[in-house]
Amino acid sequence: MLILMGHQATRDQVDNVLRHVREHGFEPIELPGADRLAIGVLGSNPAQIRDAVIALPGVVDAVPVSKPYKQVGREWHPEPTVVRVGEVRIGTGAPFAVAAGPCAVESRDQLLATARAVRSSGAHLLRGGAYKPRTSPYSFRGLGAVALEHLAEARAETGLPVVTEVLTPLDVEQVAEVADVLQVGARNAQNFSLLEAVGDVGKPVLLKRGLSSTVEEWLLSAEYVVSRGNPQVILCERGIRTFETATRNTLDLSAVPLVHSLSHLPVLVDPSHATGQRHLVPAMALAAAAAGADGLLVEVHPRPDEALSDGPQSLTLEQFSELMEGLRHLIGALARA
């Protein structure tokens, strides 16, 4: 439920409403707006207290919220959120943001070479997996803490903020010491204890859509993070599992404008995992920009054919440079349209 306060509501009146909500066993959250203050009410069936608060001094109305996700929805928060990662801004009205780098950090030299190249081509953030969730336990699963050291060195040299994945609640503190953005991957999209743990840290969180998650389930996963007091969530569409086997996943580009209409959170697209094929990545990256995505997450490797993880979907350094040039032309054309 959303309690709307009057333009002239006093602090005492607001505090009185907050007290009444708590006395009825619900959690109130103040939602300052451009014109007036609103109070969101969290809990099971909060509409039952409408009659108790509607007559309180300063209250204009109390309206039900139709969506199960509250704090990430536009009913509570109509204005778009722009997430800041150092000097990089991600969201509506901010420059198109690109995070690029290897699927997995394989060595110091591999990471530094990639970081230098993607920075030179115009990337805004460096992505690279220190810990990798793999379908097979025998696949390369990352260098762990050593990779975090390499990522910290790459950031110090290039100035690119680091995006890297965290797998378990126990890893959050260690990864957060290095990462500028904590990534929750598709396999962990409904790992609720992990979502709460990254929410508690307070750093920006990149939340990928689950392998078979509906849009509502995806947004409810984001709600777990935001409900812990961390509104800095970046959603990432990375393709979903369907009956189609010609591509690794099926990229749901309709989710980009749809989620923008439902949520105030920024949305990135990962064309690498969505397609699984290097030659499809540039076209889907450009399509994502045209669909209104706020940025991209792209896998890049100096020698993709030798990569220990996801080589077939990784762009070469030259291909990434060409993609960035194409994006600049497209975004300029879209701005003039």
Image (cartoon, grey):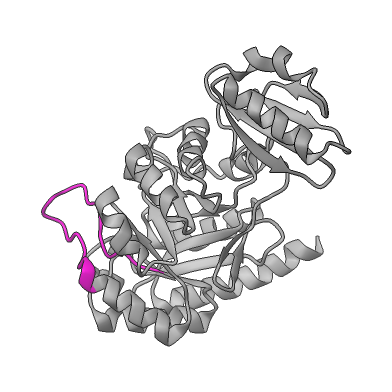
Residue 199 x/y as whole percent: 44, 48
Residue 16 x/y as whole percent: 71, 30
Dominant secondary structure of the residues highlighted in magenta in the image = loop
Residue 68 x/y as whole percent: 56, 26
Given the current orientation, which residue lies at the most extreme bottom position? 157
Total numbered badges shown on the rendered structure: 0
**Taking the image as drawn, is residue 246 in sight?**
no
Q: Nearer the viewer, residue 257 or 284?
A: 257
Given the current orientation, which residue lies at the most extreme left position? 138
Q: Is residue 247 above or below residue 139?
A: above
Q: Which of 29 and 139 is in front in this view?
A: 29
Magenta highlight on residue 140: yes
Q: Nearer the viewer, residue 245 or 9?
A: 9
The residue under the point 82% across, 25% down is 57
Quadrant occupied by the N terminus: top right
Q: In this view, does 143 lie above or below 122?
A: above
Q: Quadrant of residue 330?
A: bottom right
In screen coordinates, is 5 left or right of 40? right
Q: Which of 279 and 299 is in front in this view?
A: 299
Given the current orientation, which residue lies at the most extreme front position? 12
The residue under the point 63% across, 41% down is 263
Q: Quadrant of residue 256?
A: top right
The residue range painted magenta reads 127-146
In screen coordinates, is 239 left or right of 173? right
The residue under the point 39% across, 44% down is 195
Q: In this view, does 49 lie above or below 74?
A: above
Quadrant occupied by the C terminus: bottom right
The residue under the point 41% across, 84% down is 156
Residue 316 x/y as whole percent: 38, 74
Magenta highlight on residue 310: no
**Taking the image as drawn, is residue 249 in sight?**
yes
Q: In this view, does 7 lie above or below 141?
A: above
